[in-house]
Amino acid sequence: MLTFSYYAPTSLNQACRLLSEAQGQARLLAGGTDLLIQMKRNLVKPQFLIDLKKIKRLKGIEYDPEKGLRIRALVTHSELLHNPWILGYYPILAQAAQTIGSVQIRNKGTVGGNLCHAVPSADLAPPLLVLNARAVVRGLKGKKFIPLEEFFCAPNQTILKDGEILQEIEVPRMPERSKAIYLKHGIRRAMEIAIVGVAVLMALKPDRRTCAEVRIALGAVAPTPIRVVEAENSLQGKIIAPEEIEKAASIAAAHAQPITDLRGSAEYRQEIVRVLTARAITHAARII
Amino acid sequence: MKHHNYSIIGHRQPAVDAASKATGQAQYTVDIQLPGMLWGKILRSKYPHARILNIDTSKAEKLAGIKAVITHKDTLGKKFGFVRNTADQYPLAVDKVRYIGDEIAAVAAVAEDVAEEALALIRVDYEVLPAVFDPLEAIDPEAPLIHDGQNNISARLAWEFGNVEEGFGESDFVRQDTFYTQPVNHCPLEPHACVASFEPPDHLTVWASTQGVFYLRNQLSRTLDMPISNIRVIRPQVGGAFGGKIELFPFNVCAAILSQKTGKPVKIVCTREEVFTATRCRHPMIIHLKTGVKKDGALVAVQARIILDGGAYNSTGPVATYLAGAFLCLPLKARNIKYEGFRVYTNKPVCGAQRGHAVPQIRFAIESQLDIIAETLGLDPIELHLKNAVQTGDVTLNKQVITSCGFSECLEKIKAQRSPALPEGKGIGFATCAFVSGATYHLFFTTEAFANAIIQANEDGTVSLITGVADIGQGSDTVLAMITAEELGIGVKDIKLITADTDLTPYDWGSGSSRVTYQAGNATKMAAAQVKKLLLEAVSHELDVYPEELVARDGRIFVRDRPEKGISFAEAVSLAQKSTGGEPIIGQGEFQPQEAKVNLQSGEGNTSPAYSFGAQLAQVEIDKELGKVKVTKMVVAHDCGLAINPMAIEGQIEGSIAMGHGQALYEELIQEKGQTLNADFINYRLPTARDVPEVETMLVESVDPGGPYGAKESGEGIIVSTIPAIANAISNATGGRIHSLPLTPEKLLKALEQKTK
Amino acid sequence: MKEKEGNKKGKQLSSVSRREFIKGLGAGALGTAALSGGIIALKEAEAHPAEESLEEGIKIPLRLKINGIRYKVEVEPRYTLVDVIRDQLQLTGTKKACDRGECGACTVLLDGKPVYSCMTLAITAAGRDIMTIEGLASGEELHPIQQAFLENDAFQCGFCTSGQIMAVNGLLKQNLNPSREEARNALAGNICRCGTYTRILEATLDASQRLRKGGGNRG
């Protein structure tokens, strides 16, 4: 690893100031599970490393029955797995966190890191997208709220500007009669980067057969994690039936723009999107 | 299965080095730190094929902390190779580089990162040459020549026993397929490593993560032009090898030269990326296979034409090419066999030996094809195998002598385990294997003695077992200690092991080709028997009985019919020493396989003194929409001869299955224009604890007349049948047949799509 | 290839005074408290004694608490924990096999939880409880997990073993009675190329039983 200067500020303000002063030459260290690999491979060569782990404000999970959930950026994947609010009200997040790497990675890797690295395969992104989460971003000029859909710009690139730090993620309450699920396709049963990730949130009307609202998000099949509104629209207001599910799944597959890489061909990924979307819709619609 | 009255042999014995491994105290080569030790690093080629015009090391030499920089000019320019007469690799590139990773220069520095920094300062001027990556293109006479002055065929072996054309004429059904296998890496968790310490004027000590200290010493001796007696090679614990640490590597030579130049010990530890790209991998093969059978499944003719993609250097090439042909049929018999194997140079990482050495590839092809044939003819594949099964006393067409064979019993046991109808999406697959219990020495063109042991009895009741065998984690030290303990009637804890140090231990070829239990085991048993003879003689005088009336067991030597009449083993040692006037009580044993009978050119000869056999069932669950395969269970019947340590044998079988599982389903080095794209453990996937199947093992103990207590091979054979068993199970579950490894979801979906067309 | 473009030694940002800087580093215990339940409870911080700044390429003294013993080391900010404990402290039981957080051989416990020490900067481990394989046995007596590994023949080459045992230890600190599936899941970040997974799993369940009988995992 190349040399760098190390900073461990204790406040967000300090961190923002340091970050902006570094003029793009700094990287933020949270869990380090992605960043340190990139630094060891010399793919990322920061002159300054700003360790956020001393900042209290970035830690913890809060829940308010009205406002919903607040996950601070330094919350680890392991914390998601064991948090009673998450297990009770947002189990999709625990379920997605469980698919990440290994216990060692989950013990260090953070929600903020997972999102800010902005890899298309980030496992927490599709679930948070279907939960209509928004990012609370802290900069020198104060706070900003950014819908998560607008957060990702390109592979490894978020909307964050110099001096801005992801402080927390706000997740509204899930709609009534709704269920969300994340399905991940990988080869091994652990230590896998998603070949395809699909999250579906389904809310049913009181008849429990008609789709009141559906949200579908995909990972690893576009430059960023994406929502597929077209597929959602095809299902909205419909009675959930196999042919409707197939139709929505096919639209989702058609809107995926995967690339061929080491983990799978574009063609194969597209097919997997179709299969997993159909399964996720079926699953989310069934178990309410 | 207990059918004998041994007190140690056949019992479940935890490894002798277990406590040191469980506490982290076990010392591996990577753990060695010596005073003043420097770190060495290797500069490797960026190009798959290039002429080296100039190497400028001046900047690197000036870097603070750099103690030495070497290029080929600092070497003797001597080629080395696994097989002596096909040596083609230099310690540091002399004229050309032939693959991305080829060694160009080496540095020694006070710290690892300084050494790394220095590499970036070495300037190499290349003339990039056209490269060839596809073995079929490399065979073309117009292809760029990788080794000047010779074509790109690094080895070619061909033979025919009987007449296959006539055989195909007589057959009721002839099937022809082409199969493809992929490059895979051994991935030992301990990276390849060595520490070299040159002591003036002329002595070199090398600690190495190696499978054979004597083999390494001989190779170093030739490459450095030093007498073997001036080189001491020591094996600390080895963190896995699987065939990948059987050879000399350029970094070994570089560490030695760097140490000589600097007067300091030099340590080189390969990075994971180097292990992936610059050590060895399994030979990918293109296998054209044609098989003719009678209606009842009797094998009439088998013909194989194989292209082995060897990479840039020869490595074990000729041996691999031979073994693929030698195990074309075994454990089955055919009336006519024809084989042609070409090993081809390409500008890619070098291929060599790996668990099962060339046999898993050929067996994937033939077991897949036999499965297709059985299905086509409506035969039960197990019955088909039973019909053609080799038996004890058989001599195969290529003159392999079957001294013991429990293969049919393996088949019967597996047959009994087969569940009848399976639900949709589930399947079972069946495949078999045979493997060597060590090779006969002319395969390796070594003239040295093959396996030896020295045992000295100590008057405190312990014995020292001195052997050159390098345990690489498979538990061979434990097996040899058990043999010693059984023979002398003492406990395994009473055996003090002195192993794998060329200055202290007698010659042994090393841990390769599954030879240790059989070959070093025989040598050890013989040495222990000699000690026992000396002790029994002394005790017989003391007790006034004939030596034949005495038994050594449970730490005592006593009269068989009157167990109360006897003395302790410790007393016996003192007694024997006194009776000889203080001579040490030492036994010596050796093992030499039969005279060379293998002729690589004709393919004739007995490959090994004994053969293991196995049969295996894989159970799978398939997600047909995703193409995902889950292997739920493996049932194995393995004829490993008498099982000296059943616990370790089960471990070897489980290990073979775990590795075979990965290599069947997902392991593959992805190479593009000679560049390996997935030299890491995320994109090159190894099975995790959540992936491996449940394993049920049944041991079939055909007692081999030549093996120690009847023991044979157990470390490698089962990977051979694991891979085709999974392939056949996938086909059984889905009807889709994949002809190339690994059996990925994507390929399965394609195969299923083709089926429905 | 190693490049150093622009990385001039001694570069420092002014937004944080050296004092704050050092204070920040000293608050290691804070993180622990926050992780374990959102309650902030300040333990005695491992105050950083040095006056040096943490500029690139410059070594600074650091205190690490490993297996209950306090060690003084000198590190650059870029040094990972595995290198410091192996190369500087000669605690070589912890292995480095991939150096990319992909195999688990370097697993240690950080405040009781398994982490990859090759993906942990040593500097971020100051003030935290680090446990390596060397801290498990008490004297000659093997810890029940080690004993279970030994009796179940749960290794071959042994190179992954330290990491496996630490992963098991981390699991059994959290859950003394894991199911097979929970155990498998906890072990999935530790590669064993020898393929002794079934035995490691058996050893884990065996150890959990031993520990339940013995009254808990104090390892």
Image: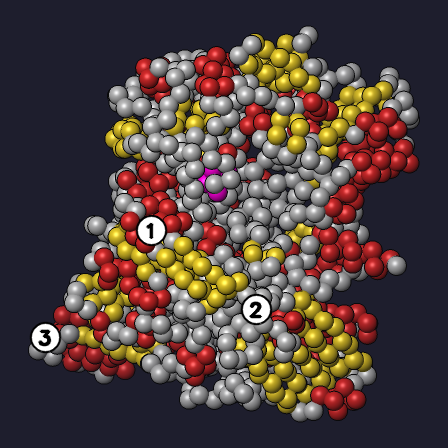
Which amino acid lies under the numbered mark 3 shown in the image of this protein?
Answer: Gly
Q: Secondary structure at mark 3?
A: loop
State which quarter of the image contains the C terminus of chain A.
Answer: top right
Cα separation, mark 1 vs mark 2, equals 32 Å
Q: Secondary structure at mark 2?
A: loop
Q: Looking at the image, is mark 2 or mark 3 nearer the viewer? A: 2
Q: Nearer the viewer, residue A277 or A121?
A: A121
The residue sitting at 50% across, 48% down in the picture is C191
Q: Residue under circle 3?
A: B582
Q: Residues within 10 Å of mark 2 (few under 14, many from 20)?
A: many
Which numbered marker is on residue B346?
2
Residue B415 image point, x, y percent = 68, 67
Q: Nearer the viewer, residue B384 or B568?
A: B384
Mark 2 or mark 3: name the one nearer the start of the chain: 2
Residue A158 image point, x, y percent = 62, 26
Residue B330 image-quadrant placement = bottom right
Do the residues marked 3 and 1 share a common chain?
yes
Q: Looking at the image, is mark 1 or mark 2 nearer the viewer? A: 1
Residue situated furthest left in the rendering: B581
> In terms of secondary structure, what is the magenta stretch mainly?
helix
Residue A39 forms part of the magenta stretch: yes
Q: Residue under circle 1?
A: B60
Do the residues marked 1 and 2 share a common chain?
yes
Left or right of B669 in this view: B484: left
Which amino acid lies under the numbered mark 1 shown in the image of this protein?
Answer: Ala
Left or right of C192 in this view: B71: left
Left or right of C103 in this view: B183: right
Q: Residues within 10 Å of mark 1 (few under 14, many from 20)?
A: many
Cα separation, mark 3 vs mark 1, equals 60 Å
Q: Nearer the viewer, residue B686 or B89?
A: B89
